[in-house]
Image: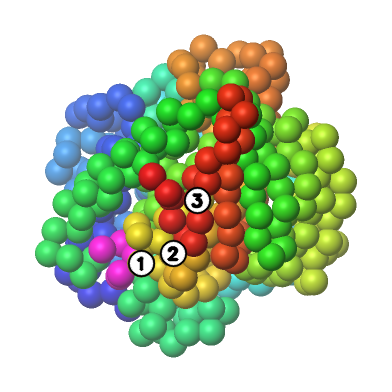
Amino acid sequence: MLTNVQLEKYADVLLWGLTTARTGRFRRNDIVLIRGDLGAVKLVQRLQAKILDMGMHPVVRLGLTSEMEKTFYEKANHKQLIFEAPGTKKLHENINGSLYLFAPESLTHLSSVDPKKIAKAAVARKPLRDLLRKREEKGVFGWTLCMLPTPELAKHARLSMRQYTNQVIKACYLDQDDPVQAWKSIYRNAMAVKKWINSMDVEYYHIESRSIDLRITPGKKRRWLGISGHNIPSFELFVSPDWRGTEGVYFANQPSFRNGNRVEGVRLEFKKGKAIKVKARKGEDFAIKQLSMDKGAKQIGEFSLTDKRFSKIDKFMANTLFDENHGGRYGNCHIALGASYSDTYDGDPSKLTEKKKKEVGLNDSALHWDLVNTEKKTVTAHLTSGKRVIVYDDGMFKC
């Protein structure tokens, strides 16, 4: 497990992430929501203390245990699935920051639960997520999240607890004397890559690997973002493309744990922007039902690339936060099915109406499911001028 010194460093890095992620500045008397699993309580305690020292108001909410979550989905009727506790909306209308600390005691406890019930609850919570997204677009809200090592994560990653913990320490730079300065350096280096890739007028990107042959259209007024403090760790650079231009085949060679289910070998075939065929070696029924959650669930909301020079993660971690930032031998790419990130619109996101989002092809959904591929791949930008530029190869951006 992490030592007390490492937990202190982790808390400092998370607060750097939170303040960096918000476009507006935090002020005294701002409200910060801290949510975490029971296994994260020691880090929650440190964050509470530091936020109090900053003159802000921490609101602490501990998550359900795996047994409680399973019981909820097994027993809840329709009204209970969509129930919103009094005061929940008001809290979301007023919080200025959110920290989520993931420390699961189980990854597969919901495997026997009907995916439709999970989807129904997710759709019911979407208005709260939309509310926070709008507050973020206005610069009055920021968020970040992290993961702490647990025996369950180590087991599913097929690592010892020591090996798993060491991956977390390396990935978050907790072995550095001043990890915050290390993150600031990565942030500056990523800015140079984003400036380079955003300078191109791209008609579409062609992603090719042993199992992928996919075309993604960035769309009008898009910008690549990433390493912005939102996730700790985060080494990916990403864009929310015009979903309508997605064509071809995508394959996730990394397993995915979602809502208590393990899904492996997901293969998606896209035509005119929609996933028309969904296959999986394991968890196919769950995957199909996830993509039936709502109208936008079959469409992509994100395309991402990770440069192996940034990331020290070189093991499968059984956790999307780490796996979507895998460095290793060939870096990684991932797509996310479902919701887009409006801040990848190259303009004022707060002025994006729902009509405008549809016009530019930003996807809307209660789903956001990241699916990772770590194969050796080449990404070629086909420019509007007719020129072709290899932007990513051998796990690295080619700037």
N-terminal of the pair, mark 1 or mark 2, is 1
Q: Quadrant of residue 75?
A: bottom right
N-terminal of the pair, mark 1 or mark 3, is 1
Label 3 Cα neighbours within 10 Å, binned few <14 / some 14-19 / many ≥20: many
- Apparent side of residue 2 relative to residue 4 in the rendered image (left or right): right
Marks 1 and 2: CB-CB under 8 Å?
A: yes
Residue at 27% across / 37% down in the picture?
A: 19
The CA span between labels 1 and 2 is 6 Å
N-terminal of the pair, mark 3 or mark 2, is 2
Single out the mark in the foreground, 1 or 3. Answer: 3
The CA span between labels 3 and 2 is 13 Å
Residue 61 pos. (x, y %): 43, 50
Mark 1: amino acid: Lys
Residue 126 pos. (x, y %): 64, 35
Residue at 25% across / 42% down in the picture?
A: 188
Q: Give the residue at mark 1.
A: 312
Let me know if residue 374 appears in the view.
Answer: yes
Mark 3: amino acid: Tyr
Q: Nearer the viewer, residue 310 or 325?
A: 310
Q: Give the residue at mark 3.
A: 392
Q: Give the residue at mark 2.
A: 327
In the rendered view, how is the structure colored? Answer: rainbow
Mark 2: amino acid: Gly
Residue 40 within the magenta-colored segment of the rendering: no
Residue 27 pos. (x, y %): 22, 27
Q: Secondary structure at mark 2?
A: loop
- Apparent side of residue 18 relative to residue 397 in the rendered image (left or right): left
The CA span between labels 1 and 3 is 18 Å
Q: Secondary structure at mark 3?
A: strand
